Image (cartoon, rainbow, N blue to C red):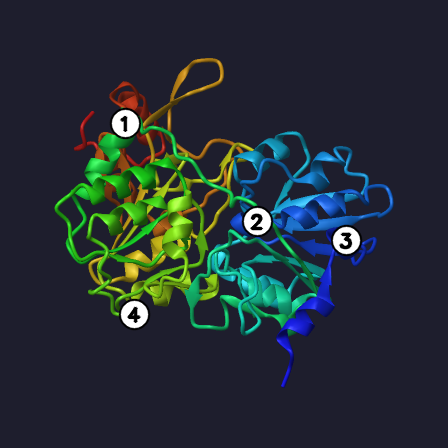
Amino acid sequence: MTDIGKEYRDKLRSPDDVAKAVKSGDWVDYGMGPNFPELLDSALAKRKGELKDVKIRGGLVVAPRIEVVESDRLRETFTYNSWHFGAYERKLHDANLCNYIPMTFRYLPHFYRNHIPVDVAFLTGSVMDEKGYFSVGLTNAATRAIMQKARIVIMEENENYPAARGDGFENTVHISEVDMVVRGEHRPLPELANKEPTREEKEIAKHIVGLIENGSILQFGIGGLPDVVGTMIADSDLKDLGCHTEMLGDAYVKIHRAGKLSNHTKNRHRGKSIWTIALGSRDVYEWIDENDDIWSYPVDYVNATEVIAANDKMVCVNSALEADLYGQVCAESVGTRNISGSGGQLDFLTGAFLSDGGKGFICLTSTYRSTDGEVKSRIVPTMSEGNIVTDPRSQAFYLVTEYGAVNLAGLSTWERAEKIVSIAHPSFRDELIRAADRQKIWRRSNRT
């Protein structure tokens, strides 16, 4: 019988010793979100100048800094790449210190298994339990796929990391599966703070909550607007709600505490909240810890459209930056400036459409203020130059601003134009109508 304690001690190393496993030319994987390997990142950064052409993948970093980037701002040794930008990575991109990796979230494990190399995998997880398992479930998107591809697998423990439940395989890693272990201290997990909602965001949330039925299954994307919707749901009369989401955040904690998150109406995983990445306040992590009602699964399962659609009344709430009169949506860039990423927005928009009674909401404020102080419309005649289409017009569903919610599914171009103009800011509607007329998507019997 294997002595788990001895195997652990034999594999225990200092961060500096572990960093020596990285060779010039390697691809190193950092995981995503709260799985950021803080100790290993700092140790690897010390090898600047000693190594050449080390490429690193990560994503949604909430940590104060990435040492391999900050120590090498000329990118002489390290090249950092991200699957999905947080605010910090966005600033790095602006300084030409971070590159985006385009993807649709549900395909992430497939990319690792079939298309891209991994030499060294830096994993972050809980302290090993008595059976030799580390929990890695806070970011369970593609952990198994990364491990299967990596030449060397290294585990960085964090004593504050919660034990996330799941099916017992995808959300845990056994000591026998790793090559080295770095013992962590009581490092705080990264927390995602949401700002006080604006009047416009509250109006958008009202429109959405008014269209949600009892027994709906909820998915909230990242950002302030979905969190406002979640908070409003917690304060509403809705009941018997469920959770099937790629990201588990504070909105679900609020709905749970309000006694509304039963998961009793789910067709799949009845009684369980299902998710693939958790990011929020300490409340989220404490709620997850050893909670058998909340299960972590990999993203190729959670975001599979057929899995999403299997639940009736699937309601998805995601944010956008711009929408045009055809129903195309940009949620990830401003021109060529990368803001976030595609993530799983299209996965859930499609799944909600296929769900019996499902609704997929894309929400955005009708205007924004540019850096020079000018008020501009987020609804435009055609996509602005350089903007990435996150959701194509063929997948259009509900579009929501503070002026209303419109369902675009199955509508012709002139019908779409009429509905989209109706939720634009009144100051821009006449201008949009003239543009729609020039684009031959405005019917004469429409308002002129």
- Nearer to us of marks 4 and 3 is 3
Quadrant where the N terminus is found in the figure: bottom right
- Image coords of residue 120 (percent x, y): 72, 60
Quadrant where the C terminus is found in the figure: top left
* Disc 4 residue type (three-letter): Arg
Res 268 label:
4
Tell me if 76 is positioned left or right of 229 in this view: right
> For this rendering, which residue is in front, 144 or 79?
144
- Image coords of residue 49 (percent x, y): 86, 41
Residue drawn at (57%, 65%) of the image: 128
* Disc 3 residue type (three-letter): Ala
CA distance separating discs 3 and 2: 23 Å
Identify the secondary structure beneath mark 1: helix
Above or below for 12 versus 64: below
* Disc 1 residue type (three-letter): Glu
CA distance separating discs 2 and 1: 30 Å
Label 1 or label 4, whichever comes before in sequence order? 1
Tell me the quarter of the picture where residue 441 sits.
Answer: top left
CA distance separating discs 2 and 4: 28 Å
> For this rendering, which residue is in front, 2 or 29?
2
Above or below for 70 versus 125: above
- Nearer to us of marks 1 and 4 is 4
Identify the secondary structure beneath mark 4: loop
Identify the secondary structure beneath mark 2: loop
- Image coords of residue 70 (percent x, y): 70, 34
In the picture as drawn, the residue positioned furthest to the bottom comes out as: 1
Tell me if 442 is positioned left or right of 280 in this view: left
Residue 248 appears in view = no
Label 3 or label 1, whichever comes before in sequence order? 3
Quick one: label 1, few (<14), some, or many (20+) residues within 10 Å? some
Res 200 label:
1
